Image (spheres, rainbow, N blue to C red):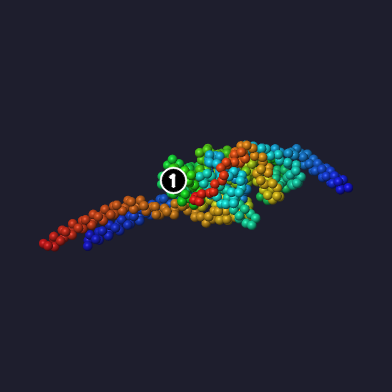
Amino acid sequence: MIERRDFLKGCLACGVTAATVSVAGTNAMAAGSFEGYPDAMGVLVDLTRCVGCRSCEAACNKEQNLPEPDLPFDDLSVFKEKRRTTEKAYTVVNEYQVADKETLFRKMQCNHCTEPACLTSCFVNAYTKTKEGAVIYNEKVCVGCRNCMIACPFNIPAYSYSSPLNPLVKKCIFCYDTRVKDGKPPACVEICPQQVMTFGRRADLIKLGHDRIQANPGKYVDKLFGEKAVGGTSWMYLSSVDFDKVGFDGHMQNEPIISNVKDFLGFVPMVLAIWPALFTGVHLLATKNKDGHHDHQEGDHQ
Amino acid sequence: MHAAQRLMIMALTGVLGLLAASVCFGAGIPDQITINSIQKYYGPVNFNHAAHINMLKDCGLCHHHTTGAQVADPNCARCHKNSGAQAVVSCKGCHVAEPFTPEALKQQRDQQPPIYHRDKPGLKAAYHIGCVGCHQKMSGPTGCQDCHTRNDSGDSLFKAGNYAPKTPAKPKPAHH
């Protein structure tokens, strides 16, 4: 009986320790606490300015040395269907019918999240969020598992299905190597005739975006998409219609994607650290109990 | 009789046009402006300034407050209602060709006072937002090549003309 009580006490102690560790862990690693690098760059996209000329797609193709497209970049028949990013196109423009006679165009590319889900989902640590704000990746370590494609809330990483022997993930890198690293704007931003995209420090762009809304309250919906969505993104958007109408999830969570699994993931190291000790204890107690029982029996006989 | 009438109307229109032109262009206002800020991919655009003046008759629609005309935008009018004609009137006098260099961004950030003029588009965008915006409203030409003649390196960029994809467009794979 005494042994059993000891065993229960032990379990309780372990439980309390585990709970403490778990709580401490959650506090220390709270997701969404990273506000981004102070001088990180970003892009403010004003959907009301885009005329759907596809110059950004052409410039991206050239800058990133991408394969030849299926159709020329001045072919506007591509707007018949909604396209997504592929290994051959790191950015694509889609057209949305937002009212009877009104259409809006939206360019899609990596939004370069402050706390990227692709980065946190990658088990070979291929992704890096640079201090300039770009989310880049190391092709050399990518094993092609496609976790990032599932994790990305914007459906951005594409896959080189055309390369069966060494398929890799492909996505926009904010022209990091060739431009943003040196303080220059990405190729798509530079070529845009309408300056749909404004390049600058993310912190400044947030102010600029709200100023633009304030100066033209009838023109824009009062929201800067990307300021808060999934913990904030480097690319942010202004629109004249609800963001749901131009292919965004207007109700996207404000917490980074990692918060959805962080509580669970916090348990994993705890289980690894505590369970061996716990079960060793159980084993020892169980074995000791056997011996003690034997001694006890002997004592009873006397 | 009809031919003579038509001739008279044409002559009268011509005289009126010349009159309007002489009134407007007394102060060194160009009739024709060659815009070649994106000559890397396109030939220069010969902008017929005179025709646009004759059609719009309001300099303030394009030139904000700088010509001394009435300001169209109420946000600008708060300060510039009576600010008069400025020394700099041309687009490229205020709108810079490269708005996103580190220097340009710093200048924008350090600007005093720290309000207004901070969201100033670059030169290329100033032209396009002004031109295309008005052309959309007034049913003017809005296609890229309605105004711009694309050159060889432009064709190469757009993978068009001599650089068009040789292989026929393949159907999209079912999986993504």
Going by the image, does A282 lie left or right of B131? left
Please name the amino acid that badge 1 sits on. Answer: Gly
Q: Is residue A187 above or below residue A22?
A: above
Q: Position of residue A89 (x, y in %)?
A: 53, 45
Q: Quadrant of the C terminus of chain A?
A: bottom left
Task: Give the residue displayed 44% in from the left and 51% down from the top.
Answer: A258
* Residue position for label 1: A144
Q: Residue at x 51, y 40 (%)?
A: A176
Q: A290 left or right of B150? A: left
Q: Residue furthest left?
A: A302
Q: Nearer the viewer, residue B175 or B166?
A: B166
Residue B92 occupies quadrant? top right
Query: Along the horizontal axis of the image, is B35 left or right of A35?
Result: right
Q: Position of residue A99 (x, y in %)?
A: 62, 56
Left or right side of B58 for A237: left
Q: Residues within 10 Å of mark 1 (few under 14, many from 20)?
A: some
Res. A149 in view: yes
Nearer the observer, A233 or A76 = A76
Q: Secondary structure at mark 1?
A: loop
Residue at image x 34%, y 55%?
Answer: A18
Q: Position of residue A37 (x, y in %)?
A: 49, 44
Q: Nearer the viewer, residue A272 or A173?
A: A173
Figure label count: 1
Q: Position of residue A289 (x, y in %)?
A: 21, 58
User: Residue A98 appears in which quarter of the rendering?
Assistant: bottom right
Q: Chain of mark 1?
A: A
Residue A239 visible in the displayed image: no
Quadrant location of the N terminus of chain A in the rendered image:
bottom left
Task: Give B149 or A117, whichever is nearer the viewer.
Answer: B149
